[in-house]
């Protein structure tokens, strides 16, 4: 993130424009950029700790991740020829892009969260031949940026800002898909990250389906009643609330919620484990395709 360009989705705000996609310096932009010079990423947890009342210690209880906070610091820089005016322009652009209320107003369906895209290096050139991984958080500003101005720092303005991600995971920018059909009813899903990834299934129908259409992953069966479908109906299952796909445990038919289609246990939902996992569909009468979509996820 510190050595590559980065972009926040609201107003398409760009950082590190003095660097190209490979991390090389673009001399023309050295004095016309907003740099990221430092970052801090922290994920919070909530648990059910219960201290013992009459003895030493306690029960740690279950632990759950909640928010990931991202703190960035750097400098607003402007070219010498138009320094004062350009600095003010960039400052106003930064304040508008990272205004929490504006983010929410402009994207209420995501609660003001936008993609924050950046790049990191890796030694795994087998999976990532360029040695670079394009990554993303889905987050919104936690507060407006703090910008400091001092005559001793003429020509630049230090800033600090905070982002908060309701989905604590970091994702690869590229979505992966697997299309399952009656002729090719099973296949492998690969999560190249370090934590299970959320899943979305899009099922396209050619007519009335089976009352027990099933998506299976490692012995876990997710079952839908598709007997009432007609040609061109589309059923979408979002298996969990997440940054890439929004509100989870939602089933829609042609865009309208229809939870009654689910006949497996209310607690049965699927995700994408780390590594390679086989998925399959069965009882797939009149199913044109079942497209599974996911993004590799990292802690």
Image (cartoon, rainbow, N blue to C red):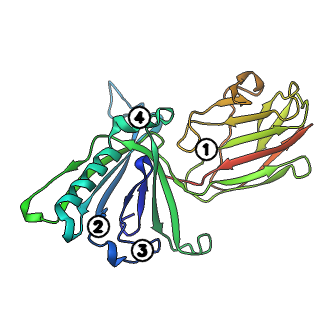
Q: Secondary structure at mark 4?
A: helix
Q: Earlier in the sequence, mark 2 or mark 4?
A: 2
Residue identifier under label 3 = 23
Task: List x then y, in percent, for residue 207.
Answer: 91, 33
Q: Which residue lies at the image location 65% right of the left edge and 37% below the top edge?
A: 239
Q: Which residue lies at the image location 52% right of the left edge and 62% below the top edge?
A: 134
- Crowding at dot 1, Cα within 10 Å, few <14 / some 14-19 / many 20+, comes out as many
The reply to whether residue 60 is in sight is no
Q: What is the spatial separation of the Cα atoms under label 2 and label 1, in whole angstroms?
A: 39 Å
2 and 4 marks in contact (CB < 8 Å): no
2 and 1 marks in contact (CB < 8 Å): no
Taking depth in this image into account, of 182 and 107 the one nearest to the observer is: 107
Give the numbered dot on residue 198. Answer: 1
Q: What is the spatial separation of the Cα atoms under label 3 and label 2, in whole angstroms?
A: 16 Å
Q: What is the spatial separation of the Cα atoms under label 1 and label 4, in whole angstroms?
A: 24 Å
3 and 4 marks in contact (CB < 8 Å): no
Q: Earlier in the sequence, mark 1 or mark 4?
A: 4
The reply to whether residue 148 is in sight is yes
Task: List x then y, in percent, for residue 24.
Answer: 40, 77
Between marks 1 and 4 in the image, the one whose residue lies nearer the viewer: 4
Residue identifier under label 4 = 104
Residue identifier under label 2 = 32
Between marks 3 and 1 in the image, the one whose residue lies nearer the viewer: 3
Q: What is the spatial separation of the Cα atoms under label 3 and label 1, in whole angstroms?
A: 30 Å
Q: Secondary structure at mark 3?
A: loop
Asked which quadrant contains residue 73, the reply is bottom left
Q: What is the spatial separation of the Cα atoms under label 3 and label 4, in whole angstroms?
A: 32 Å
Task: List x then y, in percent, for residue 187.
Answer: 80, 54
């Amino acid at each position: 993130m510190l050595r590559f360009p980065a972009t926040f989705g609201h107003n398409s705000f760009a950082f590190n424009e003095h660097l190209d996609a490979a991390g090389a310096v673009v001399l023309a932009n050295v004095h016309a950029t907003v740099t990221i010079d430092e970052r801090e990423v922290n994920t919070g947890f909530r648990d059910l700790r219960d201290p013992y009342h009459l003895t030493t210690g306690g029960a740690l209880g279950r632990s759950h991740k909640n928010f990931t906070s991202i703190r960035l610091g750097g400098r607003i820089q402007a070219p010498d020829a138009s320094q004062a005016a350009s600095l003010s322009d960039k400052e106003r652009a930064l304040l508008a892009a990272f205004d929490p209320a504006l983010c929410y107003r402009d994207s209420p369906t995501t609660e003001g969260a936008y993609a924050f895209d950046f790049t990191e290096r890796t030694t795994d050139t087998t999976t990532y031949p360029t040695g670079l991984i394009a990554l993303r958080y889905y987050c919104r500003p936690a507060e407006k940026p703090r910008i400091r101005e001092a005559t001793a720092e003429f020509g630049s303005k230090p800033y600090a800002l905070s982002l908060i991600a309701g989905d604590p995971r970091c994702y690869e920018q590229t979505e992966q898909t697997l299309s399952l059909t009656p002729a090719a009813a099973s296949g492998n899903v690969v999560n190249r990250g370090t934590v299970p990834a959320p899943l979305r299934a899009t099922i396209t129908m050619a007519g009335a389906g089976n009352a027990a259409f099933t998506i299976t992953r490692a012995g876990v069966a997710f079952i839908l009643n598709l007997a009432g479908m007609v040609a061109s109906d589309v059923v979408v299952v979002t298996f969990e609330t997440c940054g890439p796909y929004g509100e989870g445990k939602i089933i829609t038919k042609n865009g309208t919620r229809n939870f009654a289609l689910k006949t497996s246990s209310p607690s049965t939902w699927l995700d994408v484990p780390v590594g390679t996992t086989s998925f399959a569909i069965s009882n797939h009468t009149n199913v044109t395709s079942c497209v599974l979509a996911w993004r590799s996820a990292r802690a």
